[in-house]
């Protein structure tokens, strides 16, 4: 049976889709059969980040409504063998997602894949609740700002009560904290919350820390998940994150402000 | 109608109020020693000494007469403004009045408060050891109470072993005890129990309420924030005291 992981946050624009794409890519690169599902019906953009928007024929809603088979809707990733994408519908109404429909699709995917990554829409409404409902694990994406931390806290409350595992009194959803868009120099200046403050408030294990990085913007414009950019700080940070998700012990990087050394300043190296 | 007219022509009205006030608890009556210590403090945190009103508490002193005028002068020289004296003998009271200061009776320390303090400072770790409320229908909650969640005890006390985050709400018929940071809203005595209190390890509460008397974060003396405190009603006003 596949492990179902929801990437969620409450707040929008914090890096859920970026993270879902990067983590799914990272897992596939490690040889895991992985599918990433876009639950953001009406605002789909996972396909853009994954660079497969021109190959979308059928989507999640088509499958739920019986208009297409699952295999017709799944898109095979061009770069990594074990990776598939199940896109969301751009045109359908959000109510087209039903709990039974989602469960059926997850059950089918569960037989073939090792990991199912669910990219949640923002908010705490139906769409977000459906994306998390069947999850075994959750990656809670948080930016170092008060409103984002507050929304993540709210989502953690829902994970503890509004999921299948909670309702059936099974082991709780395993919760991971992923801090993204972390800018150590702005944290040092006091413009942003620091790592310790965020961890203290949310009180869950830290899975990873992704620095604010131009590489992410570049990656999303090119439609190549940033994990492939092995030279970039964000790419490396997502690779570390995936290793930790697989149970490996990897030291934290990119959380401290590095003053550029004389050499890197002279030769323009350092952070990309 | 006539009432409104009267009110408009009134020069003032009396309002009950609880203002945050620094109490300067004297342990020496010697103006020179007070001066020395003040000089040291002033250089450490000059921001505090901005004509800050203080109440001189002489409860701990065992002296029938005090050089009150000189002590006040030392305070003013360091930009502290004595507004009243608390405790002391009759002559102390008289000289306070003569200097234009108010006088407060010594602070009563209620035995009830002391008991509560004892219960808080020995935070129970084991369920079996928990001394409060649980027996009388209270509730013990383990874990973080998160934004959007509400945890309540309709009878007895509520004990939270964890933090109460911003946007969360904890309520109890009796007292609310939070063995962690209190960042959300805490309401004790929700059925009107005036004896109930709120106790927490780290005060950042959005709202504190005992039997319907409340304080918002904005009303809380910033110096108490982050501290371990007890909150209780005295004369229908919420009073917050540090447990440290
Ligand atoms: N680590 C990062 N550094 C810089 N920009 C980032 C980073 N993570 C995300 N972004 C940018 O933030 C925006 C929102 O990201 P997205 O993944 O779509 O968030 P969400 O899915 O939570 O709405 C995008 O423009 C994305 O490029
Ligand atoms: Mg998104």
Image (spheres, coloured by chain):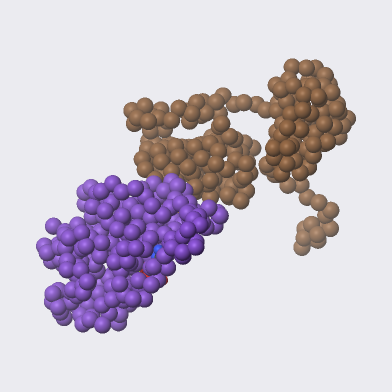
Q: Nearer the viewer, residue A218 or A116?
A: A218
Q: Residue at x 49, y 55 (%)?
A: A261
Chain A takes which shade in the image?
purple
Chain B takes which shade in the image?
brown
Q: Is residue A236 left or right of residue B87?
A: left
When asked about the image quadrant of residue A111, the answer is bottom left
Q: Nearer the viewer, residue B146 or A23?
A: A23
**Residue B227: percent from left, percent from top:** 55, 38
Residue A248's place in the image compared with A10, above or below, is above
Q: Let me know if residue A12 appears in the view.
A: no
Q: Nearer the viewer, residue A89 or A238?
A: A238
Quarter of the rendering occupied by the N terminus of chain A? bottom left
Q: Nearer the viewer, residue A84 or B220?
A: A84
Q: Residue at x 17, y 68 (%)?
A: A81
Q: Residue at x 82, y 28 (%)?
A: B71
| Number of numbered markers | 0
Q: Residue at x 34, y 48 (%)?
A: A251
**Residue A141: percent from left, percent from top:** 37, 59
Quarter of the rendering occupied by the C terminus of chain A? bottom left
When asked about the image quadrant of residue A155, the answer is bottom left
């Amino acid at each position: 049976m596949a492990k179902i992981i929801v990437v969620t946050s409450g707040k929008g624009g914090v890096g859920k889709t970026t993270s879902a794409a990067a983590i799914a890519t990272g897992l596939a690169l490690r040889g895991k059969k992985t599918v990433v599902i876009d639950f953001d019906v009406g605002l789909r953009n996972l396909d853009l980040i994954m660079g497969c928007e021109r190959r979308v024929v059928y989507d999640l809603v088509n499958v739920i409504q019986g208009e297409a088979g699952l295999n017709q809707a799944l898109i095979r990733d061009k770069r990594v063998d074990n990776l598939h994408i199940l896109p969301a519908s751009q045109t359908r109404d959000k109510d087209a997602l039903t709990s039974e429909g989602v469960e059926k699709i997850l059950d089918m995917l569960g037989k073939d894949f090792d990991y199912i990554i669910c990219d949640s829409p923002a908010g705490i409404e139906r769409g977000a609740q459906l994306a998390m409902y069947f999850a075994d694990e959750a990656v809670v994406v948080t930016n170092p700002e008060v409103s984002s931390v507050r929304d993540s806290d709210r989502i953690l409350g829902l994970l503890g009560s509004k999921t299948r595992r909670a309702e059936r009194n099974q082991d709780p959803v395993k919760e991971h904290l992923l801090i993204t868009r972390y800018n150590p120099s702005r944290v040092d200046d006091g413009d942003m919350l620091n790592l310790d403050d965020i961890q203290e408030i949310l009180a869950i294990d830290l899975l990873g820390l992704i620095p604010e990085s131009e590489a992410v913007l570049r990656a999303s414009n090119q439609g190549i998940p940033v994990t492939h950019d092995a030279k970039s700080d964000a790419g490396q940070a997502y690779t570390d994150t995936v290793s930790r998700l697989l149970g490996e012990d990897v030291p934290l990087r990119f959380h401290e402000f590095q003053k550029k050394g004389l050499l890197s300043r002279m030769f323009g190296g350092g952070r990309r | 109608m006539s009432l409104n007219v009267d009110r408009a022509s009134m020069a003032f009205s009396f309002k009950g109020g609880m203002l945050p006030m620094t109490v300067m608890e004297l342990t020496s009556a010697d103006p020179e020693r007070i001066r020395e210590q003040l000089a040291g403090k002033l250089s450490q945190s000059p921001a505090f000494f901005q004509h800050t009103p203080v109440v001189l508490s002489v409860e701990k002193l065992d002296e029938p007469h005090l050089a009150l005028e000189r002590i006040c002068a030392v305070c003013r020289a360091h930009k502290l403004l004595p507004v009243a004296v608390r405790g002391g003998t009759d002559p102390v009271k008289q000289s306070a009045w003569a200097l234009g200061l108010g006088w407060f009776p010594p602070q009563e320390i209620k035995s009830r408060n002391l008991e509560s303090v004892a219960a808080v400072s020995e935070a129970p770790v084991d369920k079996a050891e928990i001394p409060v409320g649980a027996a009388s229908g209270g509730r013990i909650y383990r874990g973080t109470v998160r934004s959007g969640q509400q945890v309540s005890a309709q009878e007895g006390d509520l004990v939270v072993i964890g933090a109460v985050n911003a946007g969360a709400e904890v309520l109890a018929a009796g007292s609310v005890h939070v063995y962690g940071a209190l960042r959300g809203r805490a309401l004790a005595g929700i059925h009107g129990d005036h004896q109930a209190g709120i106790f927490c390890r780290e005060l950042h509460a959005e709202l504190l309420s005992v039997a319907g008397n409340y304080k918002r974060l904005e009303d809380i003396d910033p110096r108490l924030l982050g501290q371990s405190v007890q909150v209780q009603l005295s004369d229908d006003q919420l009073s917050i005291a540090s447990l440290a």
